[in-house]
Structures are given as C-alpha cells and as structure tokens.
Image: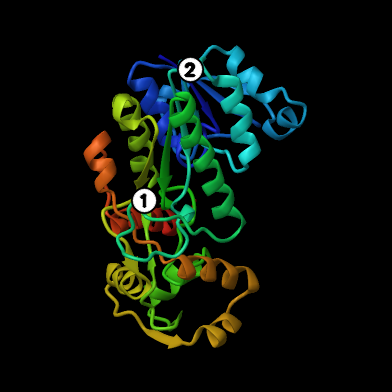
Amino acid sequence: MKIIVIGGSGHIGTYLTPALVEAGHQVLNITRAQRQPYQPHGAWRWVETVTLDRAAAEASGEFAPKVRALNPDIVIDLICYLPESARQLIDALQGAVQHFLHCGTIWVHGPGIEPPITEEQPRKPFGEYGCRKAAIEADLLRAARLNGFPATILHPGHIVGPGWAPLNPAGHFNPKVFDDLAEGRELLLPNLGLETVHHVHAADVAQSFLCAIANRSTAIGESFHVVSPAAVTLYGYAHTVAGWFGREANLRFLPWDEWKTTVTPKEAAATWDHIAHSPNCSIRKAERLIGYRPRYRSMEAVREAVDWLRRPTA
C-alpha cells in the first residue's frame, strides 16, 4: 500500500512511520520542515519526505489536491486541528482512497459522566481544542455514514514517550515536578489530588493506527479511544513517581483557588484543563473491533519519559 502520513515525524510518527515501512508499505511523510524524529530508526531511509507548508497550501486551496495528486491508497492525518482542514481533505479524497485515518483526542468528550467513558457517550466538549476536534470527528463520521468516505478516528490520551516532557502529577508540563518528587521536596496538588489523567505511550498510539489499517472493515465509520488500560489519579501518580526514587511522596493539598496562585498562569491553565476533564476512557471497543492491545500501562509509559528527562547529559 502507498500510505501518506501528514505530520509523520512528530510524537506519534516517530513510532508509526517506521512501523509502516516495516509492514511493507510505501510511505510518504508530508512535513512542513525537515525535522528529525524523536527516536532514530533505520527504516527512515526508505521514507519519502514531501515538504509542504500545510497552512499556506490550505489558504490557497492547494493542500488537499496535492495530497490527492500523490495517489495514495491510505492517508493518515496526525496534525489536523481545524474542521475546515478536514473538510478540504474529505472533498478531495472522496472516492480516491481506500482508508483515511484521523488522529483525534479524548478531549472530544469534555467531563465524563459515567467512567470509564465509552465512545458512545454524549459529547460535551469545552475549550477551543476539544470543540474543534469534536467537530472534525462529527464531519468525518457523517461523511463515512452518508457518503461512504472511508474514515476512522483514533482518540489518544496524554501522549508520552522518550523525547519530550510528559504531563506530570500536578497536571501541567513543568519537569521540575519530577525532580521535587525524586528529592523528597513538598509537592502541592489541587483539591485532594483525586482528579484523573489518562496517558498513552506514543508507540501504542502508533499500534492503534496499524490495527485500524489491518482491520479496515470494522474500523471504517468508527472512532476509538487509544489510551493505556487505566487512568491514574494525580495522588496515585505522585506516589508512584516518588516510589521510583525510594521516596514517600511529600504532598500537600490546597483548594483550587489557592493552588492556582502557587504556579505560573500557563501551568495553572494546563492543570485546569486536565482536572476539569479528568479523563478516564474505556478501550474495550478498540480491543474488540481492531485488536488494540496497549503494551504500556500509564505509569510504565510515563517512566520511560521520566528516565529520558533525567538521564545525564554529556
């Protein structure tokens, strides 16, 4: 199969693009710049790079026709954030591809009502990112069910892996939190630390795309959660990380309105986004229909990222 991966050298593409090559596919990576993947792999020598500025090409109406002109069998879009971007591809690729796979997000749900959240639960997204991704999902599923557009949507959680800082136990991305837990310093958590986060290793997200391609007949017209087997509470997350370093977590809890004054506005905004969602998603549908079997539990995935963060530098 000839497969185009849009944004194929980022978090997910670092694992997905080489895996597609190893599976025997011809792979083209559409990217805005010649960036290196987070992890080296010999398969990259067989990947054809197509340099294309998506934003500029979409503004001129050229992006989707250029994708179609490459004559792919399958298109995987890892970096679509606007409904109008998805609609351009739907219009251009209708009847021209065998499978179109979109990377969504568990943020399409908003706050959960009955965890673990299934794909069938009503969508009540909030925030610009979640609302836009929910609109993209709705457009793709409508096109699939009304017009036979071969769309599948994979919804990752908080993607982690070596090469970038993971979402931490305080609900933001400042890596100092991991240092504080490793050294036994006090860590402040909002409320009682019982809100949840739901990680997934980038390698498992990559696996989900391969599973969907291999199970095309049951994947088309569907969306799937692709997360670890279980979410974790901020409290449990902090205690687990401290235990890696032979420590007991030194935690103190503050009500949200007090806690948010102890961090930067950027960190407070990130934490609010995460605790207001408190995602806890089921993977039963992905297990049943496409054979998704995540290799990593949440804390196993995070540990790889933390080990990378704390490794000695030359």
Position of residue 193 relative to residue 43, above or below, is below
Task: Look at the numbered disc 2 and give the secondary structure of its residue.
Answer: loop
Name the image colouring.
Answer: rainbow
Q: Give, as a three-letter code, the residue at label 2.
A: Val
Give me the disc on residue 200. Answer: 1
* Residue extending furthest toward the right: 60
Q: Mark 2 sits on what residue? A: 97
Give me the disc on residue 72. Answer: none
Q: Position of residue 201 (x, y in %)?
A: 36, 48
Task: Look at the numbered disc 1 and give the secondary structure of its residue.
Answer: strand
Mark 2, Cα crowd under 10 Å, few <14 / some 14-19 / many 20+, is some
User: Can residue 294 be seen at all in this image of the molecule?
Assistant: no
Q: Tell me: 248 left or right of 180.
A: left
Q: Quadrant of the N terminus?
A: top left
Give the CA separation, mark 1 to mark 2.
29 Å
Q: Tell me: 77 left or right of 287.
A: right
Residue found 30% across the figure and 52% down from its top:
228
Q: Tell me: 286 left or right of 122.
A: left
* Residue extending furthest toward the front: 146
Q: Position of residue 5 (x, y in %)?
A: 50, 27
User: Can residue 50 be seen at all in this image of the molecule?
Assistant: yes
* Quadrant position of residue 61: top right
- In the depicted view, which residue is nearer to us: 151 or 142? 142
Residue found 33% across the figure and 25% down from its top:
216
* Quadrant position of residue 90: top right
Question: How many numbered marks have been drawn onto this rendered protein structure?
Answer: 2
Q: Position of residue 153 (x, y in %)?
A: 43, 38
